[in-house]
Amino acid sequence: MQQKLYSRWRMRAYLTLIGMWRRMTIGARIMLVDGERVLLIRQTYVRGWQFPGGGVEPGETALEAGMRETFEETGLRVQGSPRLHGVFHNDNGLSIRDHVCFYVATAFDEVHEFRPNAEIVEMGWFHHQDLPEDINDGVRRRVDEYFNNAPPAEKW
């Protein structure tokens, strides 16, 4: 419990400092799709199940960041070129400057087996109609948009 509080405080402090120097932050997430299933991860510093991904570092594209983060967090390497699903404003309560470039990938290889670590505690494949309850609205919307051809929303 204390680790979670420290991690949340650390993330809020980081986002506050970033907000002082940058006008906008850019992140990238990738939804890996295997037939009717999607891959989700659970992080130590954010509540609930998420898509793999993270911040875009200086000198890399959003796609490169999404592919790098997906590999680092899951051990799965995206093959080919994922499809850009959209760019969404992520008004998550911590920052009003965050945007997410969201990609969908259907081709990937397991390079190494996933092992829980200090950042990612769990990884799982879920049928798109049987998602865990503990996911945020943005994850739920992206799955709905992809599998049910729902119109994309502007917000994460």
Image (cartoon, rainbow, N blue to C red):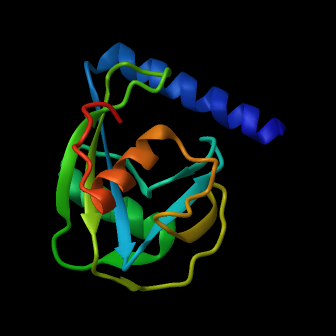
Question: Of 153 and 23, which appears nearest the observer?
Answer: 153
Q: Is residue 60 visible?
A: no
Q: Residue at x 32, y 62 (%)?
A: 147
Q: Is residue 2 left or right of residue 97?
A: right
Q: Residue at x 56, y 32 (%)?
A: 11
The N terminus: image quadrant: top right
Question: Of 16 and 81, which appears nearest the observer?
Answer: 81
Q: Residue at x 47, y 76 (%)?
A: 75
Question: Of 83 and 109, which appears nearest the observer?
Answer: 83
The picture places residue 133, in percent across and down from the top left corner, at 63, 50
Task: Please tell me in which quadrant of the rendered image residue 77 appears.
Answer: bottom left
Q: Is residue 141 visible?
A: yes
The picture places residue 79, in percent across and down from the top left corner, at 24, 79
The picture places residue 134, in percent across and down from the top left corner, at 63, 47
Q: Is residue 77 left or right of residue 125?
A: left
Whether 6 is drawn above or below 81: the answer is above
Question: Of 148 and 10, which appears nearest the observer?
Answer: 148
Q: Residue furthest right?
A: 1
Task: Please tell me in which quadrant of the rendered image residue 37 appears.
Answer: bottom left
The picture places residue 46, in percent across and down from the top left corner, at 59, 41
Q: Residue furthest top?
A: 20
Whether 156 is drawn above or below 82: the answer is above
Counting the numbered discs, the total is 0
Q: Is residue 30 left or right of residue 113?
A: left
The C terminus: image quadrant: top left
Q: Residue at x 40, y 64 (%)?
A: 70
Whether 74 is drawn above or below 46: the answer is below
